[in-house]
Amino acid sequence: MAESKNGTNRDAKKFGTGADVPVTAFLFVSALGMYVFFFNFPCFATNDDVMLKAIVSGEITGVPDAHLIYIMFPLGLILKTLYTVWKSVPWYDILMSGVHLLAYFLVMVRTGFFFRKSKPFIRIFVTLSAGFFFAALDYKYLVLHQYTSLAATLAAVALFWVMTEAIRKEVRKEGQSPSANIVAGILLILTLWMRKQVFLLSLPLFVLAFLYRTNGKFKLKRLLFPAVIGIITVLSVLTDRMAYQDSEWQAFNRYNADRTDVYDYYMFPEYGEHAEEYKALGIEETDMFPLGEWDLAFFENYKKDSMHELAEFTGNTWKELHYQKWEIRHTAKNVINRILHQEVQPLGIVLTILSLFAPVMLFILKKKKAAVTVLLSLLYEGAVVTYFTFRTRFPERVSYGLYLMVFVFITSILITETEEYIMRFITEKTLIATVLAGVVMVAGAVRIGAFLPEYKAFETSASEWSGCNEYFNSHPENVYYLKTSSFAPYGEKIFRKNTYESGNFLRMGTWIMGSPLYDAQVSRRGVKLREGLISGDGIYYVQDSVVNTEWIPAFYEGHGRNVNVTEADRIRLPGGKEFSVLSIRETVK
């Protein structure tokens, strides 16, 4: 024990205690956070997060609610409690930004400690280069928040900590860092609570990580980490199911699954070719425009069986046409295109090509187990990409998460297996290594700066929504129904007053439609849906000014009603965008 302690003291005298690594990481993350908030003020990348924040903060029903539908109930309950105690604090925003910046910190600390026996300035350079490199991959998603992509970032960092544990044993024994399994476990549970589907997407990679780290004789204690994660996962799922066990929520969950299939995958076949099937479902040709525009509030009967029947019809039609057109060559071309044009840009194509060479290099170094593990991870990535490409819907937030997790997984194996070569290179080629780290830092800084033009579009979108909201709030005596496709692109900046649902308006088609949340929102506004729109003064329908209005009287006429549509006002925004405020009133022929 004395020798070990003396050896440790000698190392500390020669290389320092390593405290410069977390200090450097903290300073970098703090500077990055300040840069983001001063130059690229964060926005929600999609209106999904805006809705989630509106639910949990109480803007939908009037009181904070933990039923976030896509975010699991345990995390929703934590946020609800915080909003209940301190309602004025933007807790959802703090979670998104705070956890994301924490991911940067953990990547930098983990990387910096790999070089614990290098000179302090080398540790600092490596730590900084890790931060800039991760920013080159992830900065866009740090600014444009989305809960699905953040869940993938957390899973990737958890993989990084788990996979690189092998080369940190002596540091862990010296008590210089917490257990990797604890850090990885917390990140993995956060991933589960934030987006269950991303958690499931990451599990095969964690299984490969477990097998990769299992060397020689099997030790029972190795099962402790997966066992604890498994127990917490089961408890989380049970808690989530109990939160949605009443009949209203169960009916909504079935409805929502069918609605997702229709609008995310199947879409609507041409009416002329399938008129009989549509009529059997009670859908007239004049219904097709509002249905296709997601304005489901016009169809109050589409909640339970009706949506299920619609999903079955559109699904069967889609499969028939899709399977007829499907060709292996065509699908393979699309898969390759999706992999090479991945969202981890501008490094995506380069990193993909390098990842493909990784198993070859490991075989040359006679690291067969590592090479096979990398190859299996690449095959898994290819299988997932093929599946989503075949389904014809592969959102950027999903593809980004997959690419990031696989890349981090492969990088972790390369670091672990080539540590001795890396350390030798650092020792013998210090100047070259320092220059390379500097190049990475410059590349990351350039990527951060280059994002500013791309950010402007989202900033404009956020300011336009603010302009619309100001108009609604300036007429508190009215109720406004918002056309879904006209307002779907608009989100808002985070860490600012949330006014998404606090105004006197209703969205005609959101993913909470048919849920107790939406019912409570409608009841809170004191209006009905389709009937309320034509029932009296002070109720208006708002859509993009370039969209025709002929579909409105045609729709009502198809349901035995006659209406007159006039433009009561026009919302003009500074950016030139205009929305028509329409008055729809029933007439007698």
Image: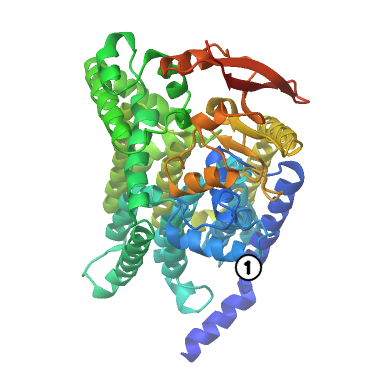
Residue type at the position of mark 1: Val
Q: Nearer the viewer, residue 168 or 50?
A: 50
Q: How many marks?
A: 1
- Lateral position of residue 480 relative to residue 562, left or right: right
Q: Nearer the viewer, residue 534 or 280?
A: 534
**Does residue 245 appear in this view?**
yes
Residue 549, placed above or below residue 438: above
Q: Residues within 10 Å of mark 1 (few under 14, many from 20)?
A: few
What secondary structure is marked by label 1?
A: helix
- Lateral position of residue 13 relative to residue 221, left or right: right
Looking at the image, the residue that sits furthest to the bottom is 2
- Lateral position of residue 279 relative to residue 110, left or right: left
- Horizontal and vertical percent position of residue 444: 63, 42
Q: Nearer the viewer, residue 298 or 382?
A: 298
Asked which colour scheme the image uses, the reply is rainbow
From the image, tell me which residue sits under label 1. Answer: 85
- Horizontal and vertical percent position of residue 582: 64, 21
**Does residue 420 appear in this view?**
no
Residue 143, placed above or below residue 169: above
> Looking at the rendering, which quadrant does residue 308 occupy?
top left
- Horizontal and vertical percent position of residue 426: 56, 56
Residue 468, placed above or below residue 214: above
* Residue found at x 43% / y 35%: 352
Q: Nearer the viewer, residue 254 or 287?
A: 287
- Horizontal and vertical percent position of residue 131: 61, 52
> Looking at the rendering, which quadrant does residue 327 occupy?
top left
